[in-house]
Image (cartoon, rainbow, N blue to C red):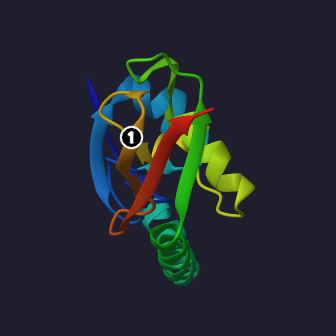
Amino acid sequence: MNVKLILLEDVEDLGNAGDTVNVASGFARNYLIPRGYAVKVSTAAVRQFESRKGKIEENRKKELEKAKTIATKISELELTIPMQAGEDNQLFGSVTTHLISEEAAKHGIEFEARRVKLEKPIKEIGNYSVEIKLHNEITATLKVWVVKA
């Protein structure tokens, strides 16, 4: 059974604040409503959203500017990650999204590991271009060099 909600916050892969969405009742009851991301459609809910609209737009602009700043820093950075590897350049382990996120944080650029888009973990010595989705509209490319430790 679906429930009709008004989003109070931007929810990735669902919609932006102010959008009316139909979602499964369990998703609404267990995730969106308790966290304050959405409310059931009603005249009071519409009024509540209208009162917050200016603040939401301001936050959106700040997030976009922050994402642009981070994207610029990411595009200028080249990460070198030393890893143990065998003679055939195969890694003992792999370079994961968490490792990339942690290494970037050491250089003062912080983003969540879930923002790193790897099709599969890196398991070989070499250089890679890694996509990082910072915002719905902004994706940055990070150069990652995996070298023998």
Instruction: Name the foreground residue: 132 vs 56.
Output: 132
Image height check: is 102 above or below 54? above
The residue nearer to you, when weighing 77 against 58, is 77
From where the camera sits, is residue 149 visible?
yes
Displayed quadrant of residue 113: top right
Classify mark 1: helix, strand or loop. Answer: strand
Q: Residues within 10 Å of mark 1 (few under 14, many from 20)?
A: few
**In the visual, does 18 lie left or right of 86?**
left
Residue 118 vs residue 2, the one in the foreground: 118
Quarter occupied by the N terminus: top left
Is 74 on the left or on the right of 120, as rendered? right
92 or 88: nearer the eye?
A: 88
Q: Position of residue 15 (x, y in %)?
A: 33, 56
Q: Position of residue 97 (x, y in %)?
A: 50, 36
Residue 46 location, x and y as percent?
Answer: 43, 66
Counting from the top left corner in percent of width and height, residue 41 is at 38, 52
Q: What amino acid type is highlighted by mark number 1? A: Gly
Give the residue at mark 1: 126
State left or right for residue 21 relative to residue 89.
Answer: left
Q: Residue at x 39, y 28 (%)?
A: 124
